[in-house]
Amino acid sequence: MSFPLLTATAALPAIGAIATAAVPAARRTAAKWLALGVSLATLVLAGVVFARFEPGGDRYQLTESHAWIADFGVRYELGVDGIGVALLALTALLIPFVILAGWHDADPLETNSSRWRPTQGFFALILMVEAMVILSFVATDVFLFYILFEAMLIPMYFLIGGFGDRAHAGSDENAAAQRSYAAVKFLLYNLAGGLIMLAAVIGLYVVAGSFSLSEIAEARANGSLEMATSTERWLFLGFFFAFAVKAPLWPLHTWLPNAMGEATTPVAVLITAVVDKVGTFAMLRFCLQLFPEASKWATPVIIVLALISIVYGALLAVGQRDIKRLIAYASISHFGFIVLGIFAMTSQGQSGATLYMVNHGLSTAALMLVAGFLITRRGSRLIADYGGVQKVAPVLAGTFLIGGLATLSLPGLAPFVSEFLVLVGVFSAYPVAGIIATVGIVLAALYVLVLYQRTMTGPVREGIGGMPDLKVRELAVALPLIALLIFLGVFPKPVTDVVNPAVQHTMHDVQKKDPQPEVEAAK
Amino acid sequence: MNPVNYLYLAALLFTIGASGVLIRRNAIVVFMCIELMLNACNLALVAFSRMHGNLDGQIIAFFTMVVAAAEVVIGLAIIVSLFRSRHSASVDDASLMKL
Amino acid sequence: MENLIALLVAAPLLGAAVLLCGGRRLDRAGHWIGTALAAASFVTGVVLFTDMLGRGAEDRALHQHLYSWIPVEGFQADVAFQLDQLSMTFVLLITGVGTLIHIYSIGYMEHDERRRRFFGYLNLFLAAMLILVIADNYLLLYVGWEGVGLASYLLIGFWQHKPSAATAAKKAFLVNRVGDMGLSIAIMLMFTTFGTFAFGPVLGATGDTSEGKLTAIGLMLLLAACGKSAQVPLQSWLGDAMEGPTPVSALIHAATMVTAGVYLIVRSGAIFNGAPDAQLVVVVVGAVTLLFGAIVGCAKDDIKKALAGSTMSQIGYMILAAGLGPIGYVFAIMHLVTHGFFKAGLFLGAGSVMHGMNDEVDMRKYGGLRKYMPVTFVTFGLGYLAIIGFPGLSGFFSKDMIIEAAFAKGGTEGWILGSVTLLGAAITAFYMTRVMLLTFFGEKRWQPDAEGHEPHPHESPKSMTIPMIVLAFGSVFAGGFFSIGDRFMHWLEPVTGHDHGHAPVSAATVTAATMVVLVIGVAIAWAMYGRKPVPAVAPRGSLLTRAARRDLLQDDFNHVVLVRGGEHLTRSLVYVDHTLVDGVVNGTAASMGGLSGRLRKLQNGYARSYAVSMFGGAAVLIAATLLMRAV
C-alpha cells in the first residue's frame, strides 16, 4: 500500500494544532513559530500533492479507502480531482499568510487580566480549521464530507466569538456582545443548513444504499440507480440549501458581514477565502454530480439568485461605512459570480468558477489582510476615520490599491481571467444573465475606488499622520500574495491545466455540451 | 363473589389516591396517597390474576411491593431531610426547580 | 524580426516595474531610466518600421505568438501580437510622442518629490497602450484597454492629496468601466458568434453571420469607444481629467489613449462595414460630440479644459470619419496622427505657460504672454494654426479630407454630415483663436495671489521647449508629408480598405467652404476678444455660455440621476438588507426565543402541577387507546 499522502496532508495540521495548544502558556512565541512551521510543512505536502496529480489521469487520484462505520456503509474514502487539488493548494497556501498576519492578534492585552486571550488556542484553532477544510476537499464519501462540513463550524465559532477585532467602535462590553451575536448567528445559520443537509444525506443513503460518491455516481451514470424525479429534487434542495448558506448566496448571506466584521481580519480571511469555498466546491462536486437532472431543473432559479447576489452585494458594498463589512459584501458579490459560473453548465463557466474560487481567495486575502494592517494602526474600522494614508504610508496604500484592483478584476491580475471566463460561459448559455452580470464589474470599480479614495487620498486626516508604513512581517504577507495575483493573471495555465479535465468530467456528469458558436453551427 | 367488584374497588382507591396527590400539600399525606395508588394497582393486578387464572399478576404485585418498600425508604428520607432544612413538609415550598 | 515586437512592450514594462518597485534609491536616476526605456521602445519601433517598408504592401504584417494565455475547452486566448501598418502607425505615434513627453516631464516635474513614480506610471501607460495596439485578439486588446485606464487613473490622481484630483481619477475610471462593459460584451458576442475573438478569424468571417449580430457587436464596440475616447454620452470624465499633470493631459488625454476608440472602430472595420445601422450610430455620436466638445471649448476659461473640449471635438471628427466606413477610415487615422502632434504640442505649450505662471490655469489671468515666452508662443501658435486648418499645415489636410469624406457619404446624410463638420470647423477656429488671444495677446492681466506672490512669467527650460519644437515641426509638416501622392492612404489601404464615395461637390469647393468658415470663426473671435480688453472676471454670459461652462449640464444630469439616485438606492438597500432580509433571520430567532419563553412557564417547579399533567397525559393516552379499539 502506498503512502497515504492525502491523509498526511490533512493530519499534519491537525497534529500541529494539538501540539500548538499544548505549548505552555508562557512560551507564546514558540507556539506561533510552531504553528507557522506546521502550516509551511503542510504547504510543502500540498505542493507534493499538486505535483503528483496528473491532469490527464483518472478522475480521482491518490485515493485511499478504509472501512469506518461498517454497519452504515460509511467509509473513510479520499481522493482528489482537479478541482479539489486546486482548492487544497489554495488552502495550504493561504494559511501561512493568515497565521503571519494574525501574529499579534491574539496577544494578551498588557496587564488587564480580564481580557487575556489564549494565544496558543488561536493558532491551534486556525490549524484545526485548515485540517478539516483540506479533508473536506478530498473526501469522496458523502457522510465523511458531511461530518467535516459540520465539524469545521466548531473551531470557526470559537475563532469568531473568542478573538474579536480590537478596533471596535463601541465599548468593550458592546464589542463582546456584537461578537457573540456574530458568532452565534454564524453557528446557527450554518447548523440549520447542515441539519437539512443531514436529512438529505440520510435520504440519499436510503435511496442509494451507499455513501460512496464514486459508487453512487457510477450507478447513476449506468442507470442501475433510478431516482424518482421528485426524490432527486428534494435531495438536491437539501444539499444545495446547506451549500448556499455556506457560499453564501442571497438571501442567505446576512451572517457573513457580521462574522467578517466582528472577527479579526485573519479570521475574516479564513471565513471568506477558505471555509466558504467548501460551499461552492460542494455545489460542483455533490449537487451536479449526484443530482444532475435536479440541478438542471433548479438552474433558472439559482441563476437569478446568483445575479441578485452579484448586483445586490455590490450595491450594498457601495453603501457600507465599515471597511470590513464592505469587503464582506464585495465577497457576496463575488460568490454570486462563482455560483453563476457553476450553474451556467458550460466548460468556460465551470473552469472559470473553479479558477474564481482560487483567485478570489488570493485577492480577498490581499485586500483584507492589508486592510487589517491599516485598521490595526488606526484602531478603527470606519472609512470616515481615514484619509490621506497614501501620503504617510505609500507602500501600504500601494498594496491596498493592488488588492483593490484585483478585487475589481483588472486585466493582468488573476481575478480577471476567472471573471471573464465565467462571464463568457454564462453569456454563451444565458445571454441576458451574462449582460446583467457585467454590470457587476462597473459596480466593483465603484466600491473599490470609493474605498480607496476615501481612505488613501486627500489631505492627511487627524490620527493618520505619523502612521508607520508596512513592516517586514506585513510585507512578507502582502508581497507574495501580490506576486501570485500577477503571476496567475499573466500565466494561469498551471491552474487551468489541472482544472480543465475535472470540469470535463462534471460536464459529462450533467450531460451538457457547450453551445456551438453560431458560425460553426451554421456550417 | 364476582372479581370485577375488586376492580371497582381498585379504581376507587386509585382515584382517592390520585386526588390526594393533587389536592393535599403535606408531603406525608401525598406520600401516603401514592402508596394508596400503588396498592390500588396491586389489588387490580391480583384481581386480574384471579380472573385470568394465571400467576402473572400476582408476581408483578410482588414486584410492586418491593419497589414500594424501596420507595418508602428513599421517599421518607427525602421528606425528613426536607423538613429538617425547611421546617415545613409542604410540597409547594420545594419549588426550587423552576427557573 | 517579429521577435522584436515583444520588446516594444517589454522595455516600458520593465521601466514601470523597476521604477515602481525600486524604492527611494532610484529617485535620482528614475526619470532617466524611464525616458531611456521609452526611447528604447521608440527605436525598436523605428527598426521594425524600416523593416516593414522593405517589404511589399501585402506581406507587411508581422505576427508573434508568445504563449497560450487562457486555455479552456473551446476557449483559446493567446498572448500574441500582430504588427501591421495600422498598428505600426500607432506604435510610432505612441512611442514617439511618448518619448518626447518623457523628456518634457523631466523638466516639468523637476520639483515634485514623487517624480520617479510619475515616470513609472508613464512607462506603465506606454506598455499598456502598446499592448492595446499590437494585440492580435480582442481579449488582449482588452488587457491594454483597461491597462491604459489604470495608468490614466493613476496619473490623473497623481496629486492625490488634492481631493479634486482623486475624484476626477475615480470618475475617469468609472466612466471608462461603463465603456469597458461594452467591450467585454462585444467580446462575449464574438465568442458565441464566431467561437473566437482573434482579429483574423473574426474579421474574416463577418460574412457568415447575420447583420443583427454584427450590429449588436458594433454597438457594443462603439460603447467601448465612447468611454475611452470621451464621446457623448460618456464624455464627462475628460474635462475633469485635466486635474492630472499637464504632460499626462498631453500624452494620454490628447494624443494617444483617447484615440484608442478610433483605433478600435477602424480595426473592427469589417464588422462595421457589415452593419450599416451601427455605422449610422457611430456617425451620429461623432457628429454630436464634435459640436458638443466645440461648444464646451468655447466657454471654458481654464486653458486645459478649453483644450480638453477641443480634444473631444477633434476625436468626434475621427469617430465620424470612422463611421463613414471605407470612405473615412484612412482619414480618421490620418487626422488622429496629425492631431497627436498638434494637440500634444498645444498641451505642452499650455503646460509651459502654467509652469511660468505659478500653475495658474485661468486664461483671463494671462494676457500678453508672447513677450515673455517666445518659444512657447511660436510653437503654440503653430499648433494653433494647424488645428484650425490653416492652409498648408497638418490640420488643413487631415480635417479637409474628413469634411470631403463626410460630403462623399452621399445623399441627405452626406449633406447633413458635411454641414456639421463645416460648422465644427468654424467653431474650432473660434475657440482656438480665443485661447490664443486670451493667452498671448492683449494686456497682461495677472495679479499677485493671496500671499502676495506675483507671477514672473518666464520661458521654460530646454528639456521642455525641445519637445515642443519637435511637435511643432510635426504640426506643420506631417499633414503635407502624408498627403503628397496620397502616401498615407496607400500605406494604410491594405489594412483598412478605401473607397472614394460619391462626392456631390468638388474637392476644391469643399476646401473653399472650409476656408470661408475658418475666416468667419477667427473674425468673430477677434471681434469678441481681440479688439477690446478682456475682463479678468468672466461675465455672466448667455444661457448657452453658462450651460457650456458647466459642460452643457451633463455633469448636473449625472449628479442628480446617477450619483444622487445611486446614493438613495444603496442607502435604501442597506436599510432593506438590515430590516427585511436580516429581519427575517433575526425574526425567526426572536420568535423561537419567544416560543420557548412561553413553554418555559409550564415548568413552574410545583410537583403537584407536574402530577396533574402526568395524570392528564395518562388519561388522554388511555382514552386514545380505547377510542382506537372502538374504531
Image (cartoon, rainbow, N blue to C red):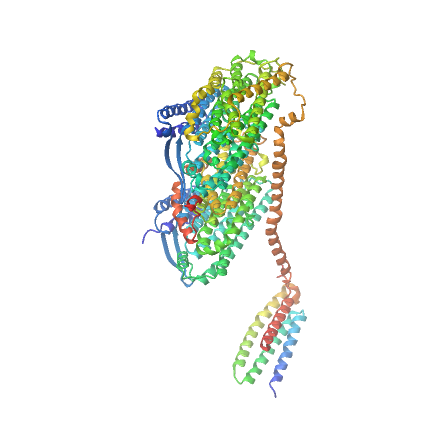
Q: Residue furthest bottom?
A: B1
Instruction: Tell me the quarter of the picture where residue C169 sits.
Output: top right
Which x, y percent locates residue C229?
Answer: 52, 30
Q: Return the residue nearer the eye: C476 or C535.
A: C476
Can residue B14 be seen here? The reply is yes
Can residue A28 be seen here? The reply is no
Q: Return the residue nearer the eye: C293 or A261.
A: C293
Instruction: Look at the picture and state if A102 lies above or below A457.
Output: below
Instruction: Look at the picture and state if C94 lies above or below A205.
Output: above
Which x, y percent locates residue C6?
Answer: 38, 30
Which x, y percent locates residue A424?
Answer: 46, 43
Instruction: Look at the picture and state if C242 lies above or below C203.
Output: above
Quadrant (top left, top right, bottom left, bottom right) of the N terminus of chain C? top left
- Total tally of numbered discs in the picture: 0
Instruction: Tell me the quarter of the picture where residue C419 sits.
Output: top right
Q: Return the residue nearer the eye: C448 or A223.
A: A223
Instruction: Tell me the quarter of the picture where residue C232 sits.
Output: top right
Residue name at image x 61 percent, y 82 percent: B7
Quadrant (top left, top right, bottom left, bottom right) of the C terminus of chain C? bottom right
Which x, y percent locates residue A311?
Answer: 55, 43
Q: Residue furthest top?
A: C371
Q: Return the residue nearer the eye: C337 or A42.
A: C337
